[in-house]
Image (cartoon, rainbow, N blue to C red):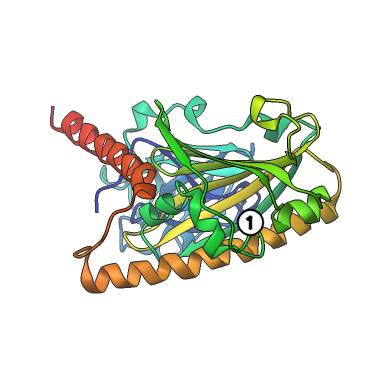
Amino acid sequence: MAFVRNAWYVANWASEVGSTPHRRTVLGEDIVLYRISNGDPVALSDRCPHRFLPLSQGEVRGDEIRCGYHGLVFDRTGHCTHAPGEETIPPNARVASYPVADRMGLTWVWMGAPEQANPDDIYDLPHYHDPAWGVGHGDALQVDANYLLLCDNLCDPSHVVYVHPTTLGVPGEKSEKVTYNRADWGVETSRWTLDGEPIAFLKAFGNFQANVDRWQFYLMHVPSVAIIDFGGAAAGSGAREGRRDDCVRVFSCHFMTPETDSTTFDYWLHVRNFAPDDDGVTDGISDQFRIAFAEDKVVLEAIQTEEERHGTRGRVGLDLDGSAGLFRRMVTERIRDEAVANNA
């Protein structure tokens, strides 16, 4: 399967990248992550060019990594700096080095043309850095499904009624109009539910008992970053017109990294506009999300299995698929543009 390569993907939580080599698979390629003495992360191809032992089975020594089989040493650029017993290091004794950077508590890697990598292009949520907002770092959820199935899910506010009735949806809630628009960065999908029963999340963390006006904005960035801006305010208080001084608002952030054609890691975190220093609230939100994301995982893995068995023949389209369809076309455009550029 072709992937968008000229993009930043999350390789790991920044806190898990240290002086011990750590292996990850990104876009089907195995990489080894570690930090050098000044704290900078390094990402190299995880295969020694001598006998192909993964470098992640070696050790970091100073600012370099040493293979655990015959002791070849590589620097952060992937060049071999020492080959025991060799007077001259073979010129092809090197491994690929990938641009890498830390942002928002995550370590990101660029799998495409290195000269095009700009860390300023890494997605950054301003509220994450605002001390008035609380932050909760979640998990790296492994889903045995193609990453585009996860993107479909995160372009779709309508599924929450059926998949997440105890957390993010209200059972039996009427279907509200969903709108979507193309942006330079991807697709924005929106849905408002006015004067409706608060979902369990808003009851638990906003103490809403009466009806609310609730919003769901799904911001799906090409190729695989999803920011879900959702929340609620008292019905009729003007939230839809922009008056949200007294509301509960949460950004649920998903950074999806294709591991292979059929497996994906979803690194997720959340940012909220209330109780910024309350660890109990942070943990409570994470627990709610773990329930919901586990429900998504069951659905998406089942779809992956059916697609592997039967393909997509006989699939019926609905109007609610428009946002996901547009997003998939934008991903295809990026992949095509990269292919054209590479063949120019």
Q: Is residue 138 left or right of residue 301?
A: right
Q: Is residue 193 left or right of residue 27?
A: right
Q: Is residue 180 left or right of residue 29?
A: right
Residues 43 and 300: in front is 300
Q: In which quarter of the view is residue 275 placed?
A: top right
Query: In the rendering, at what x and y percent does residue 267 appear?
Result: 55, 52
For the N terminus, the image quarter is bottom left
Query: In the rendering, at what x and y percent does residue 186 appear?
Result: 40, 34
Residue 318 vertical position relative to residue 296 in the rendered view, above or below? above
| Residue shown at 51% from the left, 25% from the top | 120
Q: In which quarter of the view is residue 290 placed?
A: bottom right
Which residue type does callout 1 highlight?
Answer: Leu
Q: Is residue 198 left or right of residue 147?
A: right
Secondary structure at numbered mark 1? loop
Query: In the rendering, at what x and y percent does residue 180 appear?
Result: 43, 36
Please identify the residue farthest to the left as the structure is shown.
Answer: 344
Label total for image:
1
| Residue shown at 26% from the left, 41% from the top | 332
Residue 190 vertical position relative to residue 294 in the rendered view, above or below? above
Residues 229 and 3: in front is 229
Residue 154 vertical position relative to residue 236 in the rendered view, above or below? below
| Residue shown at 26% from the left, 59% from the top | 316
Q: Which residue is mark 1?
A: 168
| Residue shown at 42% from the left, 64% from the top | 300
Query: In the rendering, at what x and y percent does residue 344 appear?
Result: 13, 27
Can the viewer see residue 84? no
Can the viewer see residue 108? yes
